[in-house]
Image: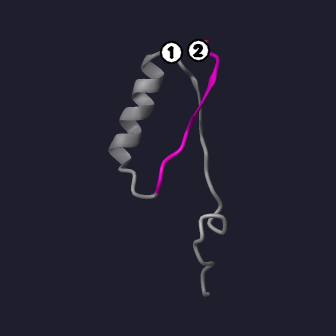
Amino acid sequence: VSPEAKIFVRGDREALHGNVTRLLDHIRSTGFTKIAFEIKSQAAAGVPAPGQ
């Protein structure tokens, strides 16, 4: 796998910040530099809009 490959990270709202930081550090230490987070809009996640 090329270090130029893009790594996509997906987690849930319960993921601890420290765990995410360690994951990113590990990914970077292996030579990958293109890291992206997959996100869901609040509507897609089933979170009600403010005031509703």
Label 2 sits on residue = 3
Most frequent secondary structure within the magenta stretch:
loop
Residue at image point 35% right, 41% down: 19
Verify CB contact (< 8 Å) between mark 1 and mark 2: yes
- Mark 1 closeness class: few <14, some 14–19, many ≥20 residues within 10 Å: few
Q: Position of residue 30 (x, y in %)?
A: 45, 16
Residue flagged by tag 1: what amino acid is it? Answer: Gly
**Image point (36%, 34%), residue name:** 22
Instruction: Determine the residue positioned at 39% across, 51% down.
Output: 15
Residue 2 at what x, y percent from top left?
61, 12
Spot occupied by residue 26 in the image (x, y as percentages of width and height)? 40, 25
The magenta span reads: 2-12
Label 1 and label 2: CA atoms lie apart by 6 Å
As drawn, is 6 to the left or to the right of 27? right
For residue 25, which quarter of the picture?
top left
Q: Quadrant of residue 6?
A: top right
Residue sitting nearer the eye, 12 or 28: 12
Name the quarter where the C terminus is drawn: bottom right
Q: Which mark is residue 31?
A: 1
**What amino acid is at disc 2?**
Pro
From this view, report whether residue 27 is shown above or below residue 51.
above
Say if the magenta span includes residue 10: yes
Residue at horizontal 37%, vertical 48%? Answer: 17
Name the quadrant of the N terminus.
top right
Query: Is 7 one of the magenta-colored residues?
Result: yes
Q: Is residue 15 above or below residue 42?
A: above
Specify few, some or many for label 2: CA neighbours under 10 Å numbering under 14, 14-19, or 20 or more. Answer: few
